[in-house]
Amino acid sequence: MKTQKNSYDAVVVGGGLAGLTAAIYLAKAEKSVILLEKAAQLGGYAQTTEKNGALFNFGPHAMYEGGAALQILAEMDCLPPGGYAKKTNSGLIGIKQGEIVHIPTDLTDDENQEWVNLMGGLQNIDVEAINGISIRQWTEEKIKHSRVKEFFYGMCRQWAYCDDSTVLSAGYVIRQGQLAGNGVRYVEKGWQTVVQILAEKAVQLGVEIQTNCKVEHVYHQDGVVHGVNFADGTNISTSNVVIALGPNEASRLVPGSDEMSLGSWKEQSRPLYAACLDVALKQLPRSDQVFAIGLDQPFYFGVHSLSVSLSNNGSHVLHVLKYNDDKVKTDAKMDKKELMELLELLQPGWEQEVVATRFLPKILVANDTHTAAHNGAGSAPHPSVPEIKGLYVAGDWVGQEGRLADCSMASAKLATEQILAQ
Ligand SMILES: Cc1cc2nc3c(=O)[nH]c(=O)nc-3n(C[C@H](O)[C@H](O)[C@H](O)COP(=O)(O)OP(=O)(O)OC[C@H]3O[C@@H](n4cnc5c(N)ncnc54)[C@H](O)[C@@H]3O)c2cc1C
């Protein structure tokens, strides 16, 4: 591996949102930093792919107003152009037994009243007090009507990307609902825009970025980090490594990790997957049906191109998704068929309008579920690996703050604060 120097103040492994965030904060503090990414392109799961002019994120991607990601992007002066998810006049759409159910028109007055009270009161719920109980327990205790419960479970799935209400922390998921209530922001031309802005900022601040550069091991001795090694036998010296990867890859990089906290964090993490159909259409057959949630099935449907451009040719981009738990055996063919049927229900005749499609049968959405057993936090409680001085982890499975990209970026920032505080 050929790098500008042999030694850096910090090495960041992984060029996704977490790695880029860590690199920027460290470089801002005038540390010499190298960021190493194994793929040819930066971005990890935040990449956007062009297909027939359509710009597909990996499935539906949105940032929550008031969440850590937007706050940190603003702090780094890296806010991307974007727009808010549009509300329609048709109310909330649920899908049950292959049919559309509307709030408020298909619910009784009592059910509607309970729904309005529930959603209106969401912001006032003390989430800290219910981090340790499951969202199933909370819902069954607090909500009376079964149809209101179904809609609420559908919203919880969407907020947490998880279909198992028995394990998901009530405090964590309701906190996500509170943030979603502030507004949901899509990014102009897809999340690659964020990646690009972050990469430019990092380079401006002096970060050396190497793509096509897979780290083999973190080298440590006597409880202290010394550097990273590559397959060709070369290495880089440093006293600080931020591993901005999932728990399995993080453990693989660190010899002896099974005997450390890293090993138990890996064992305790509970990944979330989804089957996802990304679709671009010339026009929307039903412009009044742009968002829906499954009531008896773990489905999500959303058109993301109403407030931002997600194509180079004016087409509409939408995502249909099925939340798949890692504990459940999935059937890709069946999942695709169900997602296409759902799309036909909501956008009849869509196949005549297709510009591009992409099916992702089982994509990792998150490395951890933020369970009640962990009080809603990630499986790693904090970024520093206690057994090795100078070793930190960052990602959606690390720390107390937020979900998905919020958690990734918040833990990356925290890792740099811990390095700088040494
Ligand atoms: C279907 C779907 C929907 C989603 N929706 C949302 C959403 O609405 N809102 C939200 O906030 N988030 C969402 N996410 C999650 C979001 O994309 C991720 O949380 C975020 O991009 C993770 O960033 P990261 O940097 O932590 O990890 P990653 O993106 O996984 O980045 C890790 C990087 O490390 C690299 N790497 C791995 N091993 C090595 C090695 N040995 N050496 C060097 N490099 C290595 C990888 O190539 C990768 O680029 C969604 C994800 C999916 C899949």
Image: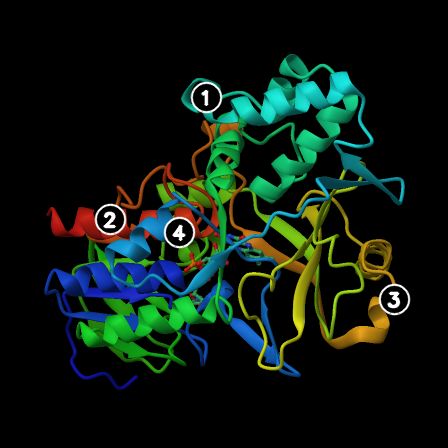
Q: Which amino acid type is shown beneath numbered disc 3?
A: Gly
Instruction: Judge: label 3 CB < 8 Å from ligand 1.
Output: no
Query: x%, y% of residue 200?
Result: 29, 75
Task: Please say if the residues under marks 1 and 3 sit with CB atoms less than 8 Å apart.
Answer: no
What residue sits right under mark 4 in the picture?
408
Query: x%, y% of residue 190?
Result: 51, 68
Judging depth in this view, the residue of 394 and 299 nearest the camera is: 299
Q: Which amino acid type is shown beneath numbered disc 2?
A: Ile
Mark 3 or 4: in front is 3
Pick whichever of labels 1 and 2 is earlier in the sequence: 1
Q: Which amino acid type is shown beneath numbered disc 4?
A: Ser
What residue sits right under mark 2 in the picture?
388
Tell me the residue at 25%/53% (across/down). Answer: 391
Pick whichever of labels 2 and 3 is earlier in the sequence: 3
Tell me the residue at 57%/71% (across/down). Answer: 310
- Categorize mark 4 by other alpha carbons within 10 Å: few (<14), some (14-19), many (20+): many
Q: Is residue 420 visible?
A: yes
Q: Is residue 299 left or right of residue 207?
A: right
Dot 2 falls on a residue whose secondary structure is loop
Query: x%, y% of residue 43?
Result: 44, 69
What residue sits right under mark 1 in the picture?
124
Task: Please say if the residues under marks 3 and 4 sit with CB atoms less than 8 Å apart.
Answer: no
Judging depth in this view, the residue of 339 and 382 nearest the camera is: 339
